[in-house]
Amino acid sequence: MTYFNNIDKIEFEGKGSDNPFAFKHYNPKEVVGGKTMEEHLRFAVAYWHTYVGNGSDPFGAGTALRGWDQYSGLDLAKARVEANFEFMDKLNIPYYCFHDRDIAPEGETLQETNKNLDIIVAQLKEQMKATGKKLLWNTANMFTNPRFVHGAGTAVNADVYAYAAAQVKKGLEVGKELGAENYVFWGGREGYETLLNTDMALEQDNLARLYQMAIAYANEIGFDAQFLIEPKPKEPTKHQYDFDAATTIAFLQKYGLKDHFKLNLEANHATLAGHTFEHEIRVAAINGMLGSLDANQGDLLLGWDTDEFPTDLYSTTLTMYEVLKAGGIGRGGVNFDAKVRRGSFESDDLFLAHIAGMDTFAWGLKAAVKLIDGNVLDGIVDNRYRSFKEGIGADIVSGKATLASLEQYALQNNPIKLESGRQERIKLVLNEVIYSV
Ligand code: XLS
Ligand code: NI
Ligand code: NI
């Protein structure tokens, strides 16, 4: 059964094309910056938004019209698997990502739920074998079911904690079965609403214990995926423990977990934390923790995770700049954790939205390569910090300087000569680079 019958394979037609169902910038086999675009970007479809999301919001019912609407239960789950592989094939997207509960319905018991999962995992495996498509990551949804009202790995109730652990165990088995490149932990309910009823220390210790158990079990079954934590400051919980990259790294360091994890960073989560996406990527990169990206964008006028498809060229350019400077995305990828707007309810919109995201990332990639090849920003940064390359600056960097030696220097060095940072000029140069590719 096919679900997108009016859509052919989306091909690269280049900048002059006015075909909305074609790429203008994403040319998978084109080599830029030493690798093909496909190798740089490693795009992934997010199962939850693309096949499960229906356009509902807190004020209104779903609007989406989908070819699988007539099904329910396991039949619906099976139809979505077929739709997934048709969709990835037509868009030439190599990877996908899912939560356990996206792909198969929950049963009455954990046994039944796992059985449903097994049926769909077998179907996914078969389709992956037939098509060569791959799983970028899977994760456990430990936030939707009412049992997680007070947390999962940070639950106030040990029975819920045990359930969450069972779900993670199964998630690791599923990841292994499907050869996932990564395994993600996103703690939607791992936080608190008020300190008045919260034992923060115990909750965080328990969360670390869950991660320890996951590492041990992955070792035991020989699942060698990269573990990722996805920071988010809030929503659904008022305060989430994995607030941002820096907080998450500190948490991992405290519990001796840092070597076992990297970060899955999401643009809209950065916005909610009061950061730019490139800030989060830089923090991860300089700590050796850049794992993967959830590509989307928020709305600066709204205070929640709107998960829009990324169409902001400045952001994708600076994102890819950070990724290239970090040496690439490694085993990670660019997962479109993004949903079409409620008003974009036709199936065609799923294609148009992914084309918009992929083209905007490819454009950003080309601009980022140009920034690097032209030594545009590196030259500026090197020049700005040049005083640390010689004399007193070199002494500071090498560790030779002391407070006394610096005082001696400062006493005779008068006046200090400062230079402009030239921000406005640099931003205009950035504009020129982005629009020239
Ligand atoms: C929610 C998160 C979620 C994770 C996976 O805001 O982005 O979708 O990516 O659980
Ligand atoms: Ni995400
Ligand atoms: Ni999100």
Image (cartoon, rainbow, N blue to C red):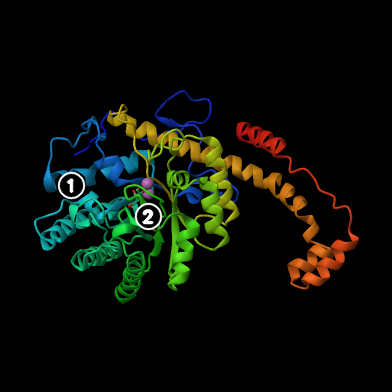
Query: What's the mark number on residue 64?
Result: none
Find the residue positioned furthest to the left: 108
Which residue is nearer to you in this view: 281 or 316?
281
Instruction: Say which residue appears at 57% left-offset and 50% top-offset.
Output: 322
Q: Is residue 160 above or below residue 74?
A: below
Provide the secondary structure element on which disc 1 rests: helix
Q: Say few, some or many: other residues with alpha carbon within 10 Å of mark 2 (under 14 / 14 to 19 / 20 or more).
A: many
Question: Does 203 sit left or right of 105 as displayed?
Answer: right
Quadrant in which the C terminus is drawn: top right
Q: Quadrant of residue 399?
A: bottom right
Question: Does 119 sit left or right of 272 as displayed?
Answer: left
1 or 2: tag closer to the N-terminus: 1
The three-letter code of the residue at mark 2 reads Gln
Q: Position of residue 21 (x, y in %)?
A: 39, 29
Q: Position of residue 433 (x, y in %)?
A: 65, 36
The three-letter code of the residue at mark 1 reads Ala
Instruction: Say which residue appears at 79% left-offset and 61% top-offset.
Output: 389
Q: Say few, some or many: other residues with alpha carbon within 10 Å of mark 1 (under 14 / 14 to 19 / 20 or more).
A: many
Q: Please report contact status of discs 1 and 2: CB closer than 8 Å, yes or no.
A: no
Provide the secondary structure element on which disc 2 rests: strand
Q: Disc 2, ligand 1: is the CB inside 8 Å?
A: no
Q: CA distance from mark 1 to mark 2?
A: 31 Å
What residue does disc 1 label? 77
What residue does disc 2 label? 240
Question: Does 424 sit left or right of 277 as displayed?
Answer: right
Quadrant in which the N terminus is drawn: top left
Q: Quadrant of residue 226?
A: bottom left
